[in-house]
Amino acid sequence: MRNDETSQASPSAGAERGRSGNISRRKLISSLGMAGVALVGGSLLGGPAEGSAQEGVVSSVSQLRNTPGEYDGQQVRLLGYYDGIPGKGGGLLIWDAAGTDEDNGGTVFAVSGMAAGRWKREYSTRLYLEWFGCKGLGTEDDSARVQAAVDALPSGGTIEAGSGKIRIETTIKVEGVPILFQGAGVTDIEGHSTQFIVATGDADGFLFSGVHGGGITGLQVRGEGLIGGSLIATERRGKTGNYMLSFYNARFKSGYNGITLRACNTVRFQNCVWNEFNGEQVILLNGVGDDSRADPVEFVQCGIAAGTKNTNTDNLVIDGLGGSIKFIAVAILYGRHGIWLRNTTGQKGTPKFLYFEGGGFENSMGVPVLLEAGAQVQFSNAYIGSDGEDDNVKIMSSFIGNAIFTGCVIRGCGRNGIDIASSRVTVTGCLIGNNGRTAHKAFARTISQIAGNGSGGIRVTTSAPHGWETDDRISIQGVSGAAEANGSWKITVVSPNRFDLQGSKFVNGYISGGTAWRHGAGIHIRKTASRVVIVGNAIGSLAEGVSRQDYGIVCEAADVLVCDNDLNGNAAGPYQLLGDETSQTRFLGNKGVEQIDGWLTAEIPGDVANGLYDLKNRFLYLDGQRIRIVKATCKLSSGTCDIRLDADGTSAGGSVLPVTSALQSVNMPSPFSIDGISSPKKLQVRVQNASSAKGLEVQFAYQIVS
């Protein structure tokens, strides 16, 4: 508002403006008081110095909407959005005399009773939610204000949320432009920093539709009373998907589902945390054909947890087509399954290129790594552990790709460390131990009935659902009456409370009692598996915890290679071979397993006198090889004598062994080597101290050293 002597408008025009509601200097001083004048440095609606823009002051948006400008380009200083809260939502506004833009409550304000003329804020790509009237208290619905801020950036930009709470009761939709929601900082304390409170019922909180760029940073998105939807979701907009969305330093908590990603390309999450979700999953990557796949998506230094109470909520599900999904130093905790690759979309394609390095899994009630469908996965230097009753890693027969586990620690689950039913699986350099927790009697199922199964076998009924699968290995004890059920068995599941004992015969009537519990191995290779390679792992007891896994490896498949593993420290044995094996199966060079490459044998019928006797097999001469003698087996028909193994007529280095008519098998306490590389050695058995000795049989077990 200018003085008459400097105004280019006519006196009559000035009088008209006065009648339409302009605020005079005297009235403004009266309404604001001297304290209000001081807040703006004493600048009021008086005339400026020559050549400068004239500036006035209004106390609130309500007053602004009743204050038309006097000329195009006039500036006023808004003290605050609301009366009594100076500084919050205020700023400089400029009068656009010809403006007819819609009043959006933040950057454009119409004046009551005027069709043309708008007060407008100057901004380019950054604006603030307090400009739109968000108080930061979280006590009223801010949805319209946030949506207005989004719509005020038609080419994209940054929306500063500031500190405090923003309440969302209607989905905020970002369409086609890159919008970055930025807070004052992230925290897990509900009274601090910046929070979006999503109270949208069964609808999504934020929906990104065909957006290229933008995302969320430096704030918390927290659900309240949600019964469906996701805190964040994406969708295709026409033919346009989402590209280069970024989520940095953000926390998502207390929702139904966390994030649903569809039709995405190049999405990155870094230093983000999810916790306390009770819906279907925390994160869903879902693709039906190329129209909705998420590819690639990257998680770096993130934490994902459904929460300790949400044992039926999966953490991360990749369903249908999915591209390159990468996890770097990510922790996935609590909830049911950790990462689940599946395909419920009906598409021929499957998830592929899953890469997980560093970080790991713990405290899930399902399977930390569940590969039901997929093409290629690799886990490197990860910790995979579970407190549940299932496997740590489960690779189902429907998984048709390649799976590689290298340098991982896989421990502490209820069943098998790795359960393999698919092809092309490689495990190398891993520590696998202390699995099979449910083999402990504390996890036993109580037996309520034993009867015949109609085919001559035994059917067991448990008092509560057993939760087991066909071909699981179990133990039963304490059965009275049908005592033939006591022992170790493989089972065929009939119903949630019943299973048959494979190979059993029902003979006696059941009286009472009995408990059953399930075993687990370090690695279980099922009969449907093929081209499995297990090399260079330590599979057995680890430094901490109790090893309940019965075998290091249980193999039912016919095409496997298991070599150079340490299989010490398993409860029942290093490995167990089941089913029909072929020449394709190889168990070689494993520590903890008696490794015999061949036998040196001699047989002396009739009387046995002192002297040297030739061997029966091709090792009469050791030529071009070095062997180590690790075991000897021998007996006489009658009498006694001593024997040793000689090379070129002298002792080969082993102890003298006493022989009687009792068969004995002796593991050499100090295995000894014989070198036939430098020159051939003639190998013979020397008999000493023979006394009425008859019918000597002897064999020395050897390993090939080089």
Image: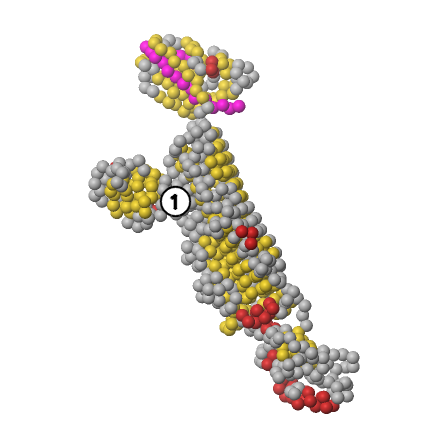
Direction from residue 91 to residue 416 in the image, left or right: left
> Is 261 situated above or below 354?
below
Q: Residue at x 51, y 57 (%)?
A: 260
- Could you tell me residue 209's position as x and y percent? 57, 61
**Element type at mark 1:** helix
Q: Residue at x 50, y 38 (%)?
A: 424
- Could you tell me residue 100's position as x and y percent? 65, 77
> Nearest the camera: 102 or 3?
102
- Could you tell me residue 318's position as x and y percent? 50, 51
Q: Which residue is mark 1?
A: 437
Is residue 304 visible in the rendered image? The answer is: no
User: The N terminus appears in which quarter of the rendering?
Assistant: bottom right
Direction from residue 3 to residue 214 in the image, left or right: left
Q: Residue at x 43, y 13 (%)?
A: 615
> Which residue type does callout 1 highlight?
Arg
Q: Quadrant location of residue 143?
A: bottom right
Task: Categorize mark 1 by other alpha carbons within 10 Å: few (<14), some (14-19), many (20+).
Answer: many
Q: Which residues are magenta?
A: 685-706
Is residue 145 visible in the rendered image? The answer is: yes
Q: Main secondary structure of the magenta part?
A: strand
> Nearest the camera: 79 or 456?
456
